[in-house]
């Protein structure tokens, strides 16, 4: 699931694309912003569908083994327990999953080898052998083998990762969010009654997060000239063109949040953009941004432009 920092990164990416584009339509890029977030949920549905395909492949593998030229007793009596994995069956019957498959037209038939690759690696593992040998058919045990398939095979097998990278352009950035959504799903499914379980949400409070990112995106653009003036005033000893675009955008986003996101504490805003700079900009950008924002913040406070609502939000 997205947290606020990850949502800020999505706004940053969209603003970066907006600044480099000749098309300056706010609606077009607002749609792209929401689309980039929705694509993570789409990736999540594709992942769940792939896990279901791996379970289904158990029967294919068993049939192939039984029809070998000289099958042995093990081939003729292959264990197909995974095919009836309780967790996957609950997911497949969940209305949100069914709706997602329909919406995103999920169909892994375009790459039939990917599920075979995963299953071939799985059946050689000690975890799988322990699973098919165990008498524990609890939902907890069923979730454990699915967790293993995701964490120890799908997430780290180059051929599988490549499939996701080719289909989802932001895989490298978004895979951390996908992992959180998968963990939340495994945690949420505690009942063998479908209606008692919940798929992961795109964020814990999307009703609040959606207007927050749209407002942040639009205000950063709408007040661009004013925010640029603040930055220019504090960087007189710098050649403006030498300041990285990402740094400029991060500072403008921070100013927009300081001035207009009334419910977010000043300290949170300052810390979040410094941390984002560490990950997405140059090695010393966080120190540079911290210094400039401190000076701008002092001026904004002096001018009465920090209108935070609530105790301790201005500190």
Image: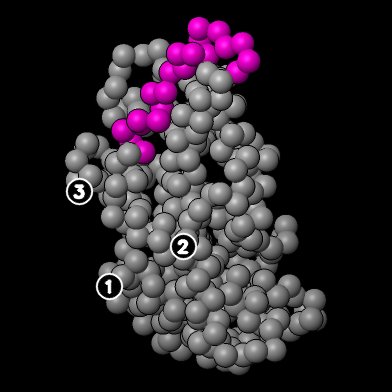
Disc 2 versus disc 1: nearer the observer? 2
**Whole-number angstrom distance, CA of label 3 to CA of label 2:** 22 Å
Q: Secondary structure at mark 3?
A: helix
Q: Which residues are magenta?
A: 68-88
According to the picture, the residue beneath numbered tag 3 turns out to be: 195
Residue annotated with mark 2:
104
Q: From where the camera sits, is residue 53 visible?
A: yes
Q: How many numbered circles does the render carry?
A: 3
Residue nearest the viewer, comparing 14 with 52: 52
Labels 2 & 1 near each other (Cβ < 8 A): no
Report the side of 312 relative to 31 (left or right). left
Magenta stretch contains residue 117: no
**Residue at the location (63% across, 60% down)?**
169
**Displayed quadrant of residue 121:** top right
Spatial separation of the CA atoms under disc 2 and disc 1:
42 Å
- Mark found first going from the N terminus, 2 or 1: 2
Most extreme residue toward the top is 73
> What residue sits 73% from the left and 72% below the top?
244
User: Is the C-beta separation of discs 3 and 1 under 8 Å?
Assistant: no
Q: Quadrant of the C terminus?
A: bottom left
Disc 2 is placed on an element classified as helix
Q: Where in the figure is residue 297, as x and y percent of width and height?
A: 51, 77
Residue lying at 45% horizontally and 47% vertically, measured from the top left = 49
Horizontal relation, residue 88 to residue 30: left or right: left
Question: Mark 3 vs mark 1: which is more N-terminal?
Answer: 3
**Which residue in the structure is indicated by mark 1?**
310
Residue placed at 70% from the left, 89% from the top?
22
- Residue 298: in sight, yes or no? no
């Amino acid at each position: 699931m997205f947290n606020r920092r990850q949502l800020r990164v999505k706004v940053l990416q969209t603003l970066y694309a907006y600044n480099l584009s000749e098309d300056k339509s706010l609606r077009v890029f607002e749609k792209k912003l929401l689309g980039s977030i929705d694509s993570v949920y789409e990736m999540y549905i594709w992942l769940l569908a792939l896990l279901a395909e791996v379970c289904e492949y158990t029967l294919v593998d068993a049939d192939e083994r039984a029809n070998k030229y000289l099958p042995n007793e093990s081939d003729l009596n292959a264990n197909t327990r995974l095919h009836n994995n309780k967790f996957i069956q609950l997911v497949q019957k969940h209305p949100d999953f069914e709706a997602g498959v329909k919406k995103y037209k999920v169909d892994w038939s375009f790459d039939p080898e990917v599920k075979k690759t995963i299953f071939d690696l799985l059946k050689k593992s000690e975890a799988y052998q322990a699973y098919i040998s165990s008498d524990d058919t609890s939902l907890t045990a069923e979730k454990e083998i699915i967790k293993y398939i995701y964490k120890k095979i799908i997430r780290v097998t180059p051929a599988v990762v490549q499939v996701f990278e080719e289909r989802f352009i932001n895989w490298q950035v978004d895979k951390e969010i996908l992992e959180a959504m998968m963990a939340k799903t495994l945690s949420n499914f505690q009942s063998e009654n479908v209606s008692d379980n919940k798929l992961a949400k795109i964020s814990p409070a999307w009703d609040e997060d959606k207007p927050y990112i749209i407002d942040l995106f639009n205000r950063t653009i709408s007040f661009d000239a004013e925010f640029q003036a603040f930055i220019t005033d504090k960087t007189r000893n710098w050649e403006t063109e030498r300041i990285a675009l990402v740094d400029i955008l991060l500072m403008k986003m921070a100013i927009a949040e300081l001035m207009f996101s009334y419910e977010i504490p000043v300290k949170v805003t300052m810390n979040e953009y410094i941390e984002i700079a560490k990950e997405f900009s140059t090695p010393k950008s966080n120190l540079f941004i911290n210094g400039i924002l401190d000076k701008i913040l002092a001026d904004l406070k002096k001018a009465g432009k920090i209108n935070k609502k609530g105790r301790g939000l201005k500190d």
